[in-house]
Image: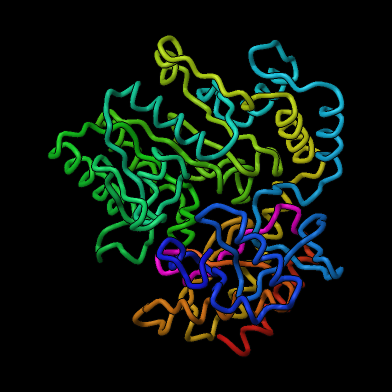
Amino acid sequence: MTATLSRAIAHYPNRFDPGVLSELPEHLRKTIQRRNDVLGPGYTLIYKEPVEFVSGHGAHLIDRHGNDYLDAYNNVPCVGHAHPHVAEAVARQMATVNTNTRYVQEALVDYAERLLSTFPEELSKLSIACSGSEANDLAVRVARFHTGGEGIIVTRWAYHGLTREVASFSPTLGAGSPLGPNVRLIDAPDPRLVAPGSTLDEHMRQQVRGAIDDLERHGYRLAALITDCAHSSDGIFTDPPGYMRAVVEEVHAAGGVYIADEVQSGFARLGDSMWGFSRHGVLPDIVTMGKPMGNGLPISGVVFRPEVCEEFGRNVRYFNTFGGSSIPVAAGAAVLDVFEKENVQQRVLENGNALRAGLREIAKDSPYVAEVRGAGLYVGVEIVKDRQTLEPDRARADDVINDMRDRRILISGTGTSANTLKIRPPLAFDSADVTRFLETFAEVAKNRL
């Protein structure tokens, strides 16, 4: 990291400005300087004053001075930081054996059966990788093989991963990471974009139809539409449920497949279903998973309708050294145990409802809050300069984020203008955490909103 903001991270939400490094406390400054000396390009830190953590539990992180921070940002530790059941399962497996999918592993088969049982029965084949990027890369490879097409449709500010292939259809990476010529962008499902007299269903249908027509005009047959079911990087658009049916109809009519990217919206994140696509009453052809799957262990997955992946499997060898190996599978199985034992989905539903209701009450009279939106424990608060014009106010959003951090609550920003507060805690977030969050947010809102 240089002494000034690079072009690559200039749009990054809530990023640390390296130009103020000299103003940080001595230990923090020296550690960041050492980090800059040894890490490769592209890394960034968040918050005006970055923070270092040494331990965690549930939805809480502890810094080197023993201060407790409420984590309302990190979805990777799905069932909570350092969950004892997951930690014990991983440690036990590490002390036993770690083999890969070239060997028979009953535990792998058990895990695949358990995970697939949470999906509609038509989605019955699982491939395991290490990251969401790898999962989406494999999903698109299979989609292209199955359809014979190359065209990809995503939303305007989507993020689906970092491999060269997946970066080519992740517009949120910015101008330094160009989109492929076979990629077309459509609106996120923001009801405010719908023309008078129309519906969100019809608006999204027309968006997809126009993208397909333009791909064909340029010689590209459609391979896939891929969407994050929470539209996380677009600004968090989860509602109203149901509009995806019209979208999937258009995709299938053009011979393409629908890939549901559940890295963000899966594992009951949205509260009323295990998977985000279920809220819309649609059946994807392919589903991808990542981050929360192993509570921080590197495991991801791709679930297929068998008819979509069979020909690929007969013709293309797919082996991933660590995908499906014993240790991450143990972590994945332990996460499913926790979901069953702790009734995680119900906790998400109840606490998510309380969190959104509290935020709406706090922000109801603010001229700077356009909307509080989301589902389950995925909430966006859109900060604007004026409710009438909806002009984004990134500076005010950054102030709120950093004020919350100063009060030891972690959130971040998202959206095309990085002006939507992103509130996305571990699913261990409980009623006491909701109360602490809302009390602190109310304090910040008095000064900023």
Q: Is residue 65 visible?
A: yes
- Choose top left, top right, bottom left or bottom right for residue 263: top right
Residue 118 left/right relative to 242: right
- The colour scheme is rainbow
- Choose top left, top right, bottom left or bottom right for residue 49: bottom right
Residue 416 belongs to the span the image colors magenta: yes
Q: Can residue 372 be seen in this view?
A: no
Residue 30 left/right relative to 424: right
Asked whether 249 or 314 is in front, the reply is 314
Which residue is at a point 62% across and 80% down the rendered structure image? 362
Asked whether 294 or 6 is in front, the reply is 6
Give the x, y percent position of residue 131.
Answer: 57, 38
Give the x, y percent position of residue 186.
Answer: 30, 52
Asked whether 141 or 307 is in front, the reply is 141
Which residue is at a point 49% across and 59% down the rendered structure image? 236
Give the x, y percent position of residue 223.
Answer: 31, 31
Q: In this view, does 58 lie above or below 14?
A: above
Image quadrant where one finds the C terminus:
bottom right
Asked whether 10 or 360 is in front, the reply is 10
Give the x, y percent position of residue 85.
Answer: 85, 39
Residue 53 belongs to the span the image colors magenta: no
Residue 300 left/right relative to 217: right
Q: How many marks?
A: 0
Which residue is at a point 41% across and 56% down the rendered structure image? 172
Q: Which residue lies furthest to the bottom in this view?
A: 447
Q: In this view, does 96 lie above or below 209?
A: above
Which residue is at a point 41% across and 16% down the rendered structure image? 312
Q: Which residue lies furthest to the left in this view?
A: 217
Chain part drawn in magenta: 415-429
Magenta span dominant secondary structure? loop
- Choose top left, top right, bottom left or bottom right for residue 309: top left
